[in-house]
Amino acid sequence: MHNTATMLIELGAIILALGLLGRLAGRVGFSPIPLYLLAGLAFGHGGILTLQASEEFIAVGAEIGVILLLLMLGLEYSASELVTNLRTQYPSGAVDFVLNAVPGAVAAFILGWGPVAAVALAGVTWISSSGVIAKVLGDLRRLGNRETPVVLGVLVIEDLAMAVYLPILTAVLAGAGLAGGSVTLLIALGTVGAVLYLALRHGRLISRAVSSDNAEMLLLVVLGLTLLVAGLAQELQVSAAVGAFLVGIALSGEVAEGASNLLTPLRDLFAAVFFVFFGLSTDPADIPPVLVPALLLALVTALTKIATGWYAARRAGIKGAGRWRAGGTLVARGEFSIVIAGLAVGVEPRIGPLATAYVLILVVVGPLTARWTEPLAHKLIGRPKTPVETERAAPEPAEV
């Protein structure tokens, strides 16, 4: 009874604090994510006050938060739109990999950590945080912007690439041979391919089976299906987040719209818990020794992510401000980077604190770059002229 009472008190205090921090962020006019992270850092291991009774519950809630964030992303688009994005955005995905994975690999070699750690740190710096970016897009009300499908296209390619990368990394870390790694990879690719096939060919049937006029039944079925598929995907060496995203892709029409309306408050709650848990699991004492390399790596890869988004938006025919908004939005790293670092600490323990500091920097900076990259770019290089301004600035024709 004492442990239960303590857990309820801690959970109540955490949720109340999240609400107050969110209200403060809303008044100031920026995303509450950095405040959630700093609050978790203050009350985690090595912080001002350690929360113990509710830690396990918060860990499970954080996992659910990532799953719901990716589910809601998937509900925004149909399977056909996903395939179209993959066909048109794959050059941007290749540029994204080169610009952002290479700095991590180079940093590992400079630090003397060896090739296995280089593979892991390349993944840490490569993958943007779909969870953070999904929250930022909602907070800044940019889901309907022209550049948003470009941003989501890059994220989709990264999330699907994780279905290939994570099994390879696991095999490399375990010292598995070519045969063992190939089997793991084939299972992962087969799982993703099967879900995409079902979504493309039988998405309407899935939506019809899930559909219900009763809001309670719809919520229970969609949430249960998402958690089930996410768990199975994790068991098959595919990310749970990728599984949740594919469930969202499979649902369409009125079902997707109804599920989105019902799940939005639940997503916001568990997403906030995820960001707090990230801070709770970080010991502030581990950060100072690796702060300088983490800052340098964060600076380099923030610029390369902005370049990635700018390039992807340019390829999509988006002009002016949309290119800078796309670049600034992609800066944040988060859940996948922490998962990758967690896998690698057994081989190279120093990668854990570095990855934590790196992600903490960019998960705080990311929402700020999403908001301020465009106006800063206009200050530095000038605001692009509108068609009306261009016409007015044109020289008058010479008199005959």
Image (cartoon, rainbow, N blue to C red):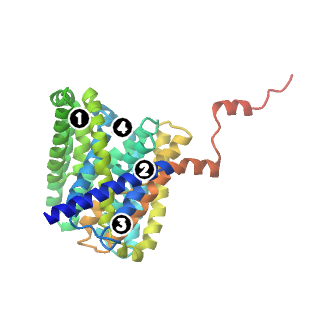
Q: Crowding near pointer 2: few (<14 within 10 Å), some, many (20+)? A: few
Gap in angstroms between the C-alphas marked 3 and 2: 20 Å
The residue that disc 4 covers is 85
Name which residue lies at 50% across and 51% down. Answer: 28
Q: Label 4 sits on what residue type? A: Asn
What amino acid type is highlighted by mark number 3? Leu
Which residue position is annotated with label 1? Answer: 250
Query: Which of the two marks, 3 or 2, is nearer to us in this view?
Result: 2
Q: Position of residue 247 (x, y in %)?
A: 22, 39
* Mark in the foreground, 3 or 1: 3
Going from the N terminus, do you reach mark 3 or mark 1 first? 3
Instruction: Left or right? Give the position of 220 relative to 91.
Output: left
The quadrant the C terminus occupies is: top right
* Separation of residues labelled 2 and 4 (CA atoms): 36 Å
Residue under numbered circle 2: 23
Q: Earlier in the sequence, mark 4 or mark 1?
A: 4
